[in-house]
Image (cartoon, rainbow, N blue to C red):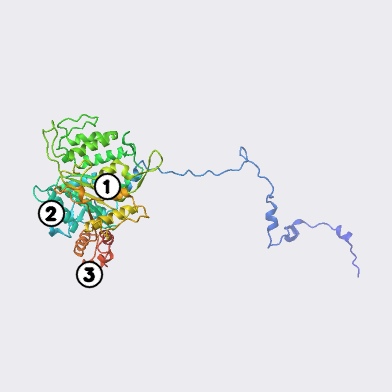
């Protein structure tokens, strides 16, 4: 049935008030679970440019990097000083109360073998002046520096005491030794003990603490003269040597006066001038350092005064000359001559002088040390170049010392295909024809330092325990175990084992 109302009639009906309309008709018809459309309606389009504010730049802002704080670079020589710093005392270590100091009386006492002798405190400045201490030695772990008395120490003490004696068969003798041994066997400390004994006897101590410093081109050099252009002098190194001599031997040099004329020196040499005053111009002016050193050496080896210098003349004391790391002087250096070719170490006048002391006499026939003394040259086990000629020379020296003649087939000969340096072999060719029968000079000797004995190792480890560094019961079994671990008592390895703290629970 068709309705009586039509759409036109419905549109003519009066509208109802807004308040009576259902709320669903007035609210926005939006699904309750979807809100993307109304939220994005007021969002800006992706391509719209931002509106610039008042006095605001439109360019892109770049973030400034934070300034990097740069530390101050170390001063000149600061790193070298830190690397070579020597510490001789540890206040945290215990003090060994009954430890004796090294003296002229106990340096020959065989009852002290295996014990530790302390270095006298007034002598430490002298030992520092001659650079007797090495940075990697274990001086900084004990309360005060001390050294172990071993068999080689007692032999050295008797030798120095015999040379200094007023009577005896060793009076005024000259002993030459080359010290070898494995790494850590105590070669440098053995030379330190020799310096300490020499200072005790008021000898003149002259040292070259590191031979490598003379050949690695870190010091100035120049031809010696126009007559000798192929021989080179190192003035700065000679001035440093004079400084060590004067600082360490000031007590002895201040008592000795000039006894010879020295026309080569530019400064006036007057009678009555002390040897300390004679050496100071070479320290202040390196240009005349070599001439001053030659004059000082002439005075120290003088046996009688010259005419006009008789007043106040005193006999010269014996001398101790030490050199460490000898192998660096047996090859070419880092210096170049005028033809840009390497200079051999034997062409340096500094090196020539100290190598000439291995011979019983000089070229003029004069004894190298007329007043007696001791010459100790050591090799190195950690920083030593491989020089074939030097190895053969040491083998020949050991064979000659064992009584093997050079004409014997057992005498070691250099391999002709390896080109051994003949100049190196000639340095150690200490033939008997160059020495007079009445001379007190001994032939060149080769001394090999090995490890400590078990008794010496026990005394050495007890010193660690008494210093508070080792908390173990020092028994024969324990010492034997550590002695074996140290390669047969190598003192450097024993020190590594002793400085490790062990706390018993």
Residue 197, percent across and down? 17, 50
Q: Quadrant of residue 273?
A: top left
411 or 485, nearer to the observer? 411
Q: Tell me which label, 1 or 2, sits earlier in the chain.
A: 2
Task: Look at the numbered disc 2 and give the secondary structure of its residue.
Answer: helix
Q: Quadrant of residue 333?
A: top left
Q: Residue at x 20, y 34 (%)?
A: 278
* Position of 369 relative to 491 (above/below): above
> How dense is the environment of label 1, judged by Cα within 10 Å: few (below 14), some, or many (20 and up)?
some
> How dense is the environment of label 3, judged by Cα within 10 Å: few (below 14), some, or many (20 and up)?
few
Quadrant occupied by the N terminus: bottom right
Q: CA distance from mark 1 to mark 2?
A: 27 Å
* Position of 256 relative to 453 (above/below): above
Quadrant occupied by the C terminus: bottom left
Give the numbered dot on residue 209: 1
Q: CA distance from mark 3 to mark 2?
A: 30 Å
- Tag 3 residue: 477
Q: Residue at x 26, y 42 (%)?
A: 353
Q: CA distance from mark 1 to mark 3?
A: 39 Å
Residue 322, percent across and down? 23, 48
- Tag 2 residue: 106
> How dense is the environment of label 2, judged by Cα within 10 Å: few (below 14), some, or many (20 and up)?
some
From the viewer's perspective, tell me whether residue 387 is left or right of residue 441.
right
Would residue 383 be visible to someone looking at this image?
Answer: no
397 or 89, nearer to the observer? 397
Task: Look at the numbered disc 1 and give the secondary structure of its residue.
Answer: loop
């Amino acid at each position: 049935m068709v309705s009586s109302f039509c759409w036109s009639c419905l549109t003519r009906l009066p509208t109802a008030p807004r308040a009576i309309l259902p709320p669903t008709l007035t609210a926005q018809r939006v699904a309750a679970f979807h809100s993307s459309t109304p939220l994005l309606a007021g969002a800006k389009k992706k391509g719209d440019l931002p509106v610039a504010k008042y006095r605001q730049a439109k360019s892109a802002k770049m973030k400034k990097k934070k300034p990097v704080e740069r530390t101050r670079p170390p001063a000149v020589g600061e790193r070298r000083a830190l690397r070579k710093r020597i510490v001789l005392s540890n206040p945290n270590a215990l003090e060994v109360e009954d430890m004796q100091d090294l003296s002229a009386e106990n340096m020959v006492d065989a009852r002290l073998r295996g014990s530790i002798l302390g270095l006298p405190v007034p002598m430490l400045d002298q030992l520092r002046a001659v650079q007797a201490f090495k940075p990697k030695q274990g001086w900084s772990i004990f309360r005060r520096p001390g050294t172990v008395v071993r068999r080689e120490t007692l032999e050295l003490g008797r030798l120095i005491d015999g040379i200094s004696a007023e009577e005896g068969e060793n009076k005024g003798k000259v002993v030459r030794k080359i010290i070898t041994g494995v790494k850590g066997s105590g070669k440098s400390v053995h030379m330190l003990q020799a310096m300490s004994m020499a200072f005790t006897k008021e000898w003149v101590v002259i040292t070259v603490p590191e031979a490598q410093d003379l050949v690695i081109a870190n010091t100035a050099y120049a031809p010696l003269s126009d007559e000798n252009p192929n021989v080179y002098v190192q003035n700065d190194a000679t001035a440093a040597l004079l400084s060590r001599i004067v600082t360490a031997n000031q007590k002895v040099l201040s008592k000795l006066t000039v006894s010879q004329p020295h026309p080569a020196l530019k400064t006036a040499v007057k009678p009555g001038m002390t040897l300390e005053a004679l050496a100071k111009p070479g320290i202040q002016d390196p240009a005349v350092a070599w001439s001053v050193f030659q004059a000082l050496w002439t005075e120290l080896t003088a046996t009688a005064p010259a005419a006009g210098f008789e007043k106040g003349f005193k006999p010269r004391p014996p001398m101790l000359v030490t050199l460490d790391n000898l192998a660096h002087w047996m090859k070419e250096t880092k210096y170049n001559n005028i033809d840009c070719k390497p200079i051999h170490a034997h062409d340096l006048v500094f090196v020539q002088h100290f190598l000439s002391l291995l011979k019983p006499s000089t070229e003029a026939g004069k004894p190298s040390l007329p007043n007696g003394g001791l010459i100790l040259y050591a090799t190195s086990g950690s920083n030593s170049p491989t020089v074939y000629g030097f190895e053969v020379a040491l083998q020949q020296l050991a064979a000659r010392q064992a009584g093997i003649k050079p004409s014997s087939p057992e005498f070691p000969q250099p391999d002709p295909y390896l080109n051994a340096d003949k100049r190196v072999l000639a340095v150690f060719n200490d033939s008997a024809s160059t020495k007079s029968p009445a001379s007190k000079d001994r032939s060149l000797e080769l001394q090999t330092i090995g490890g400590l004995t078990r008794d010496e190792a026990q005394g050495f480890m007890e010193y660690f325990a008494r210093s508070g560094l080792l908390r173990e019961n020092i028994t024969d079994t324990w010492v034997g175990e550590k002695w074996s671990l140290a390669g047969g008592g190598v003192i450097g390895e024993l020190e590594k084992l002793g400085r490790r703290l062990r706390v018993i629970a």
